[in-house]
């Protein structure tokens, strides 16, 4: 039976985030910022929603190769499970490494590295489009005859393992640092310091990085994020901004070969007429500043309520999408993504947000009319929407949003 272990683990994720958050407040560590955390979680919700529309097709792609083109048929013994675990981790390493060395792949994977903080919410900051290509790296396992359900299970647990290593609360794990991917190793991977870039691509086992020469020990302080900061809380733009950069670079390149290379070369590569390869700059400690735009404090409660609404809607869709018709599924997903976009725009004081928010609220009322939900849910949702309209109108009347840009 196909089980979505990642979806089932979501409640555990939030419990662990709560524990780390409490530890953060107790120790006064400043590991969390509201705007950054909401942005991270928004990416996670969006990734799960967009994944609904592709995960079945991609799973059946692996399954089709296994059923029709496999060279062997592996038995379901404990030793095969162990071998498959090692193989999944090995191919994850190469998928992850290539995602840092090919611009077209980095354009998707970059989302996971955009946060300038490092906490458990960063683990949930995932690309909405990475799943379209990541599965291709594992196809040798289908040809080798590893059962699809076994592969899906171990691939899920490989992903689940990586959740807990996104923390600064654990410094070193002693002897385990030689074999396992640990918080210390993964902090290096998220660093924008030149010496840390493109290091420690491991999933579960750090042995691949040690063997293939991409290992780097955590030494000086890690500065998190990407070399050219995203500077936005907009979840949609976070997934598209690097594609925008690549397309602009390609358009400035008269040679067809250079246009193609823009997408196939490593990040930092530019044609000679645009200056050639650009190395990552050193961190200037004196001028370093995290993206943290000011916003009206009165908006905080409204943002939290709307985010919780998106989280609830996303969770309902995630756990019941097999029972929903296409219209309900698509409409619910679009409304949820619009709500997450609203949260990001509010935290940036974006002026276009005012018209967008009234559109989103109107869309919510439209959903009540066209979707066949039980009357009780319709009444509750309609009440929340009505309160949101009145609340947002009063907020705007008292303190109109002005674009900081």
Image: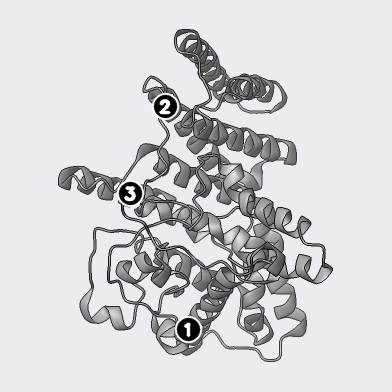
Residue 60 seen anywhere in this rendered image of the structure: no
**Circle 1: element type:** helix
157 or 39, which is in the foreground? Answer: 39
Residue 301 seen anywhere in this rendered image of the structure: yes
CA distance separating discs 1 and 3: 29 Å
Say which residue appears at 71% left-offset and 91% top-offset.
71
Tag 2 and tag 1, C-beta contact below 8 Å: no
| Quarter of the image with the N terminus in it | bottom right
Which one is earlier in the sequence, the residue at label 3 or at label 2? 3
**Circle 3: element type:** helix
273 or 59, which is in the foreground? Answer: 273
Instruction: Characterize the local packing of mark 3: few (<14), some (14-19) or many (20 or more) Cα atoms within 10 angstroms.
Output: some
Q: What's the mark number on residue 17?
A: 3
Position of 362 relative to 332 (above/below): above
Say which residue appears at 27% left-offset and 71% top-offset.
219
Say which residue appears at 43% left-offset and 64% top-offset.
160
- Locate residue 216: give its quadrant: bottom left
Nearer to us: label 2 or label 1: 2
156 or 165, which is in the foreground? Answer: 165
**Circle 2: element type:** loop
Q: What's the mark number on residue 66?
A: none
Nearer to us: label 3 or label 2: 2
Q: What's the mark number on residue 86?
A: 1
User: Pointer 2: what residue?
Assistant: 295
Instruction: Characterize the local packing of mark 1: few (<14), some (14-19) or many (20 or more) Cα atoms within 10 angstroms.
Output: some
Which one is earlier in the sequence, the residue at label 1 or at label 3? 3
Residue 377 position within the rendered picture, expressed as x and y whole percent measured from the top left = 55, 25
19 or 169, which is in the foreground? Answer: 169
Instruction: Characterize the local packing of mark 2: few (<14), some (14-19) or many (20 or more) Cα atoms within 10 angstroms.
Output: some
Which one is earlier in the sequence, the residue at label 2 or at label 1? 1
CA distance separating discs 3 and 2: 25 Å
- Locate residue 202: give its quadrant: bottom left
């Amino acid at each position: 039976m196909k089980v979505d272990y990642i979806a089932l683990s979501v409640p555990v994720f939030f419990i662990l985030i709560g524990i780390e958050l409490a530890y953060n407040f107790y120790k006064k560590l400043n590991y969390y910022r509201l705007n950054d955390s909401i942005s991270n979680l928004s990416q996670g919700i969006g990734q799960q929603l967009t994944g609904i529309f592709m995960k079945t097709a991609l799973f059946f792609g692996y399954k089709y190769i296994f059923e029709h083109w496999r060279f062997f048929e592996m038995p379901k013994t404990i030793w095969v499970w162990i071998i498959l675990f090692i193989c999944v981790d090995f191919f994850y390493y190469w998928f992850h490494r290539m995602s840092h060395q090919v611009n077209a792949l980095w354009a998707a994977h970059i989302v996971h590295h955009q946060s300038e903080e490092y906490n458990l919410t960063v683990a949930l900051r995932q690309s909405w489009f990475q799943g379209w290509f990541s599965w291709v790296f594992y196809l040798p396992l289908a040809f080798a005859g590893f059962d699809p359900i076994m592969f899906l299970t171990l691939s899920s647990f490989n992903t689940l393992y990586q959740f807990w290593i996104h923390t600064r609360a654990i410094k070193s794990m002693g002897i385990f640092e030689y074999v396992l991917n640990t918080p210390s190793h993964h902090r290096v991977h998220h660093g924008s310091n030149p010496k840390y870039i493109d290091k420690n691509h491991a999933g579960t086992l750090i042995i691949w990085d040690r063997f293939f020469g991409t290992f780097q020990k955590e030494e000086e302080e890690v500065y998190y994020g990407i070399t050219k900061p995203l500077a936005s809380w907009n979840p949609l733009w976070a997934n598209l901004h690097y594609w925008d950069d690549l397309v602009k670079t390609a358009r400035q390149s008269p040679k067809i070969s250079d246009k193609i290379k823009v997408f196939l070369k490593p990040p930092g590569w530019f044609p000679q007429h645009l200056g050639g390869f650009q190395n990552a700059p050193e961190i200037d400690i004196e001028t370093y500043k995290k993206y943290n735009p000011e916003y009206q404090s009165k908006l905080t409660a409204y943002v939290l309520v709307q985010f919780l609404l998106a989280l609830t809607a996303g969770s309902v869709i995630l756990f019941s999408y097999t029972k929903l018709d296409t219209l309900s599924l698509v409409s619910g997903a679009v409304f949820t993504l619009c709500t997450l976009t609203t949260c990001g725009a509010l935290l940036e004081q974006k002026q276009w947000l005012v018209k967008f928010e009234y559109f989103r609220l109107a869309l919510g009322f439209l959903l009540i009319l066209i979707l066949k939900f039980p009357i009780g849910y319709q009444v509750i949702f309609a009440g929340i929407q009505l309160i949101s309209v009145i609340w947002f109108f009063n907020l705007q009347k008292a303190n109109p949003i002005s674009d900081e840009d």
